[in-house]
Image: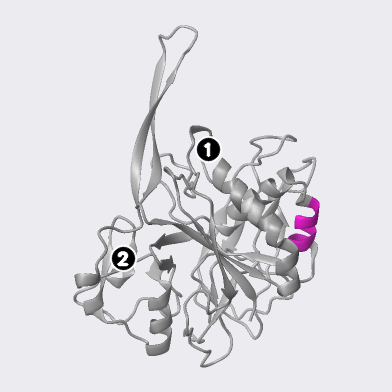
Amino acid sequence: MNPAWIVRFRPTGPWRLGPPTGARDRVDRTLHSDTLFSALTIAMAQLGADTEWLAATVDAPEPAVRLSSGFPFLADTLFAPPPQSHWPPPPSVKVRWRGARFVPVHAIGKLLADGVLNEDAWMVDGASECLLPSGKNRPQSGPCRTAMRTSAAVDRLTGAAVLTFTTACLEFAANAGVWVAVSFADEAARDAWRERLWGAFALLADSGIGGERSRGWGRSKTPEISEGTLPDLLAPGWPAQVRPGGWWLLSLFTPTEQDRIDWLHGSYSMLSRGGRVESHAGWGAEKKLTRMVAEGSVLLSGHAPRGLAQDVAPEGFAHPVYRSGVAFAVPVPAKVTP
């Protein structure tokens, strides 16, 4: 079992996680792992450790550190995209399971073990797209909701020209935020990166994650870190693999030539990733587009997926720009689709 962290960010204001289309009136609810990796790489550069960081995560035969994507949490409950091979549960007249984009991790463990969820115990919160407890255990709200913030750009020379615009963002409940998981190759890797990774996460909390950081968005309190081993750190008593070979992705994934994935029988989806470079060598230059396997996918393989980080810098750019597709995968009971 790998040493691991759960890192919780408690936002102090709105966050903007840009949607695939880049539309200002839309916002994503997932902090994708490639975005998190890029942000941590920039933070490592500010801490003077970027060369070692890239050597340990991009160039090493086995990455010293793997990152999940970021998902909502509420109080002690961690939410994640459910395994596509097992979701939704059998149809219910009370709960529209398909409306839940994020499901409590402990409920996912129960679903994997039993194959069903009690329809009387759950409800879907439309604002956050999270599956929440119902009845007397129902929380007052979901972990987050989408909101629109209006701003105005003023011509400070004349004061005559005013341009108003609106931007979508995420607003979080008082006891909610975004969690990410960190997996270390072994205890030596954890000890080697403990202090620097903690410093990079603290720097991100102070400077912000995502869009509109110049307005103070994306900031959070000092991150909270829980240590343990996977997969028990996600949910105690995680079910053992009934049939080896199922891997539930909690990150984006770009396969290597050595990854032997059964693409015919897995349950997976794809998404396109773009973005712009944040570098003094060419601020705002467009990164190359890539197709990646999405979070929540379940891949069938005899070994844990490895993945790779691709250089997506524009042609002729001064230095490599990496988009991480290194897999953060959790073993689950294999379920072969026809």
Q: Earlier in the sequence, mark 2 or mark 1?
A: 2
Residue nearer the viewer, 295 or 36: 36
Q: Residue at x 75, y 43 (%)?
A: 315
The N terminus - image quarter: bottom right
Q: Label 1: few (<14), some or many (≥20) within 10 Å?
A: some
Residue 289 seen from this side: no
Residue 303 image offset from top left, x and y in percent: 66, 83
User: Element type at marker 2?
Assistant: helix
Q: Residue at x 50, y 8 (%)?
A: 157
Q: Label 2: few (<14), some or many (≥20) within 10 Å?
A: some
Q: Residue at x 48, y 83 (%)?
A: 238
Position above or below: 274 against 95: above
Asked if residue 23 lies in the magenta stretch, the reply is no
Name the image quarter holding residue 244: bottom right
Residue nearer the viewer, 77 or 117: 77
Q: Which residue is mark 2?
A: 99
Residue 60 image offset from top left, x and y in percent: 79, 66
Question: Magenta span: helix, strand or loop, mainly?
Answer: helix
The numbered disc on residue 175 is: none
User: Element type at marker 1?
Assistant: helix
Q: Residue at x 55, y 47 (%)?
A: 205
Residue 259 image offset from top left, x and y in percent: 69, 76
Residue nearer the viewer, 158 or 272: 158
Asked if residue 55 lies in the magenta stretch, the reply is yes
The stretch in magenta equals 51-58
Q: Which residue is mark 1?
A: 213
Residue 41 seen from this side: yes
- The residue positioned farthest toward the bottom in the image shown: 242
Left or right, 236 with respect to 321, comes to left
